[in-house]
């Protein structure tokens, strides 16, 4: 982290529609033995965003001279375990539906907790997500995992008053923390990426199109 000139961009997104869609999909998820959490939507939204902003789906050489743009969409998820932090990877997210992604998240997290992750479960990610929502916090600075060039951080969703043009409307808002390598990504590009990502989270119907 000391050699990466990292910057963190903070924003938030409205989780109202994700929560509504998640509850609508719960019967199908339960029938398949899948626990559908908000993280599955974030994983899908991140893959969709990477397709629009290819500089985020990249690896930078150790000397900073070569940037490789990736043609796949593999999302790593940080898992807190008694044995330390594990970062398994959900591969080909662009080719999978929400329930399939949720199933893989559950399986990967379970393997991480029991130290049963396989070599093929790790490494080669497009970008990572660090989710502290189950623990708490309002914001943090996630650390970029080289050779990746960015990481998305999530903290606890909380009800906040949002002005709808006529009155304040209580909305579940999730804090978003995007850290990125400034050698590859500038502030304006990070802001555009975050706006796109937050838009997908706020309108999850776009995730299945």
Image (cartoon, rainbow, N blue to C red):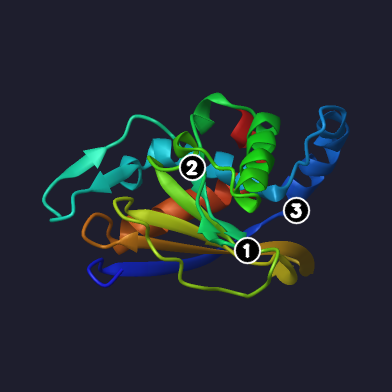
Q: Residues within 10 Å of mark 1 (few under 14, many from 20)?
A: few
Horizontal and vertical percent for residue 16? 75, 53
Q: Residues within 10 Å of mark 3 (few under 14, many from 20)?
A: some
11 left or right of 135 in image:
left
Residue at 49% from the left image edge and 29% from the top image edge: 92
Q: Nearer the viewer, residue 115 or 185?
A: 115
Give me the C-alpha separation between circle 2 and circle 3.
Answer: 24 Å
Is residue 164 visible from the viewing direction of this image? no
Mark 2 or 3, closer to the camera: 2
Q: Which mark is residue 82?
A: 1
First in sequence, mark 3 or 1: give its number.
Answer: 3
First in sequence, mark 2 or 3: give its number.
Answer: 3
Secondary structure of the residue carrying numbered label 3 = helix
176 left or right of 67 in image:
right
Secondary structure of the residue carrying numbered label 2 = strand
Give me the C-alpha separation between circle 1 and circle 2.
Answer: 22 Å
Residue at 43% from the left image edge and 56% from the top image edge: 151
Horizontal and vertical percent for residue 159? 76, 69
Reading the image, the residue beneath label 3 is: 16
Secondary structure of the residue carrying numbered label 1 = loop
Residue at 26% from the left image edge and 63% from the top image edge: 182
Mark 1 or 2, closer to the camera: 1
Horizontal and vertical percent for residue 2? 26, 72
First in sequence, mark 1 or 2: give its number.
Answer: 2
Circle count: 3
Horizontal and vertical percent for residue 66? 14, 46
Q: Residue furthest top?
A: 95
Reading the image, the residue beneath label 2 is: 75
Quadrant occupied by the C terminus: top right
**Residues at circles 3 and 1 in contact by the CB criterion of under 8 Å:** no
């Amino acid at each position: 982290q000391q050699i990466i000139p990292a910057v963190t961009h903070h924003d938030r997104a409205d989780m109202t529609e994700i929560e509504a869609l998640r509850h609508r999909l719960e019967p199908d998820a339960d029938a398949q033995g899948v626990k559908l959490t908000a993280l599955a939507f974030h994983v899908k939204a991140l893959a969709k965003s990477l397709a629009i902003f290819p500089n985020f789906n990249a690896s930078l050489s150790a000397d900073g001279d070569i940037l490789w743009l990736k043609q796949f969409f593999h999302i790593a998820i940080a898992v807190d375990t008694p044995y330390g932090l594990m970062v398994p990877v959900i591969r080909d997210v662009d080719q999978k539906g929400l329930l399939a992604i949720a199933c893989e998240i559950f399986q990967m997290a379970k393997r991480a907790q029991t130290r049963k992750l396989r070599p093929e479960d790790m490494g080669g990610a497009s970008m990572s997500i660090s989710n502290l929502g189950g623990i708490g916090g309002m914001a943090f600075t996630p650390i970029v995992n080289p050779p990746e060039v960015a990481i998305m951080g999530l903290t606890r969703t909380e009800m906040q008053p949002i002005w709808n043009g006529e009155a304040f409307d209580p909305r579940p808002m999730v804090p978003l923390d995007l850290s990125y390598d400034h050698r590859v990504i500038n502030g304006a590009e990070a802001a555009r990426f975050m706006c796109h990502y937050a838009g997908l989270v706020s309108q999850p119907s776009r995730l299945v199109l």
